[in-house]
Image (cartoon, grey):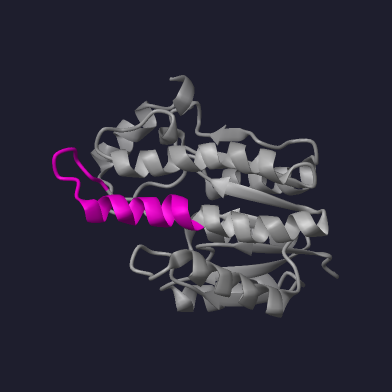
Amino acid sequence: MKSTKTTLITGASKRVGRDIALTLAEAGSDILIHYYRSRRDALQLKKDVESRGVRAEVFKADFSAGVRNLPSAIKRFVRDVYRVAGHVDLLVNNAAIFYPTPLGKITGRHWEDFMTVNLKSPFFLAQEIGMRMRRRKSGSIINLVDWTGLRPHPNYLPYAISKAGLIAATTGLAKALAPHVRVNCIAPGPILPANGATAKQKRAVIKKTLLKRFGNPKDISETVRYLWQGSDFVTGVMIPVDGGALGS
């Protein structure tokens, strides 16, 4: 199967990012796999993608608060990607961090961690790649946000605020890059339990959904596929995939 499209997915080597990569590979897209620490998982994903008959390339990059002059680092990363791949048709900003930060114990380091990885990095990636897409008059950007960006949990405020910012960035980028580049975001709810979650915590999460269950990574990857292949008349929107958590 010959591919005509190329997708870059950040944080692609595990969990939801991995499922997005495999789903889009099966749909005929070459996959550019970004990772930071999970090299073994990224190389295994490369093999799994290539077994679908499409091309896969692996790129390591640190998008954390510890990077000096992150916008310049992102420019170098994008140049490397384009030198190898030639172009990017779809950018999926999936990489993110998530951990509890109870009010009263939030530090400046916590704030910088969340705002850099979850907001600053995807924004500058979208800017750098989006401008190239606009010059090419073709492309799509999908940001992975979170339903708590609209209904923040008090023990995860910096996380929720970073995702709320990315929701706003999505709307603004859709306007700035129109009419040739579409920008949307997907707001997952409880797709996978948090690492280390207890049975009690899992039950509490499920209780907040209307469907009373966890979702599946495939719920997200199929929504990505819809925004990529299912319609070219959707832009500037947030699609909740949350089992009804926002409506509960």
Q: Is residue 210 above or below residue 205?
A: above
The residue under the point 67% across, 55% down is 130
As for residue 107 lying within the magenta part, the answer is yes
Q: Quadrant of the N terminus?
A: bottom right
The residue under the point 54% across, 49% down is 217
Quick check: can you spot residue 67?
A: yes
Where is residue 161, by image quadrant?
top left
Query: What secondary structure is the magenta-colored segment mainly?
Result: helix
Where is residue 43, by image quadrant?
bottom right
The range drawn in magenta is 100-121
Q: Is residue 155 above or below residue 140?
A: above
Q: Is residue 164 left or right of residue 89?
A: left
* Residue 51 picture location, percent across and down: 70, 74
Q: Quadrant of the C terminus?
A: top left
* Residue 211 picture location, percent across and down: 48, 27
The residue under the point 44% across, 37% down is 164
**Residue, far top:** 248
Where is residue 5, by image quadrant?
bottom right
As for residue 111 lying within the magenta part, the answer is yes
* Residue 118 picture location, percent across and down: 43, 52
The residue under the point 65% across, 47% down is 224
Q: Nearer the viewer, residue 222 or 71?
A: 71
* Residue 187 picture location, percent across and down: 52, 38
Q: Is residue 121 left or right of residue 19?
A: left
Quick check: can you spot residue 27?
A: no
Number of marks present in the image shown = 0
Q: Nearer the viewer, residue 233 or 245?
A: 233
Q: Is residue 102 left or right of residue 40?
A: left
